[in-house]
Image (cartoon, rainbow, N blue to C red):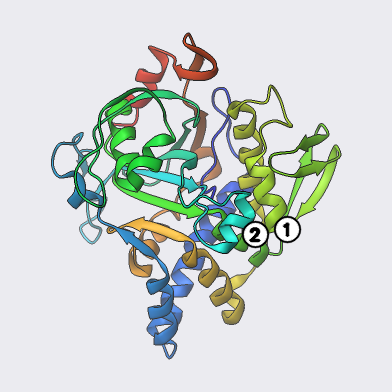
Amino acid sequence: MFLPVTGHHGDEGPEAGGSRGLKAAGLILAGTLVLGAGAAGWAYWHLSDNITGVDIDGALGDDRPPKPVTTPAPSASAPPREALNILVLGSDSRSGKENRRLGGGDSSGARSDTAMVVHLDAGRTTATVVSIPRDTLVTRPSCPRPSGGSTRVARLAMFNSAYEVGGPVCAVKTVEAMTNVRMDHYLEIDFSGFARLVDALGGVTVTTEEDITDEDSHLRLKAGTHHLDGTQALAFARTRHGVGDGSDLGRIGLQQQLVKALLEQIAAQDLLTDPAELYRVADTVTAGLTADTGLDSLAELTRLGQSLKGLSASGVRTVMMPVVRAPSDPNRVVAQEPQARKLWESLR
């Protein structure tokens, strides 16, 4: 549910483990591809079939921000590259028994519980990860509905309502409308997928500086270091009322810590030496994954992972979209201008 991580207020370079985690992610994908190319062709097919694909380009057409300029290839044997912007969402879907149990509700609807824009430069040596608070008030554009027709334009709408009314397509269109930045790809993981991923990795260790008690997420932790299982890690990522000022901004800080800890956990495991364990983790990851049609196969995900091998921790910048309290509602935020506009301009 929470893939690349965002910082809180301003830049914050990840720990060295972030670099190892990024490289490990690429190795996992590459290893999975090798597994499928050999005797275990069925496994490759099964893992690819796990991924849910959505045709965002086909749904949105040409009425979108322009694509980044392509950079010439560094050598005759290498293909030219362009910068990539990937919208990564964590969905609070209650569909399915496991999601309902983890989400604490019985609704069939879903919203984007977490949203991040991951910008990869053309050389894949630097990255900027921007978190968008879900409580941000935005103008939600008219979006095509999966069942036909379109939604109406909505002003002062909660950002995470875009996914609720129009799914991934509307989430992408809303982000592009508010940023004027083209989203080249889309990735999403739901409650149960995230919890299963943490369990498949053997849990995750986090340290809290204060006691956390949140009746909504059912999380109770004393200040100190804790090893969390999947259900606890999901609660940690969803906690907002038990930390800071109780807003979504405080929750983003917990999510930052959690994803960094997950990267450390991935880096610490030598999955490529254990094909059975590699398959188990890959099966868990892909089972909870939704991607655009440009990333909805293992081959495409592998190519992306392999392209990140030159990305080091010092090349990653993590920020949160600059926001201020909304004049119309103290419990909501709006983009802080001109800071937000300048941030998005830097990603085009």
Tell me, for residue 209, which label it has, or none: none
With 44 as the anchor, is 64 left or right in this view? left
Farthest residue to the left: give it: 62
Residue 52 percent coordinates (x, y)? 37, 63
Tell me the residue at 59%/29% (across/down). Answer: 248
Disc 1 target residue:
229
Tell me the residue at 79%/36% (across/down). Answer: 213
Residue 234 percent coordinates (x, y)? 65, 50
With 216 as the anchor, is 10 left or right in this view? left
Mark 1 residue crowding within 10 angstroms, few (<14) / some (14–19) / many (20+): many
Q: Tell me whether circle 1 and circle 2 mark residues in contact (CB < 8 Å).
A: yes
Q: Which residue type carries mark 2?
A: Val
Residue 106 percent coordinates (x, y)? 56, 52
Residue 93 percent coordinates (x, y)? 50, 51
User: Foreground residue, 145 or 191?
Assistant: 145
Residue 120, can we see it? Answer: no
Q: Is residue 206 above or below residue 342?
A: below
Disc 2 target residue:
198
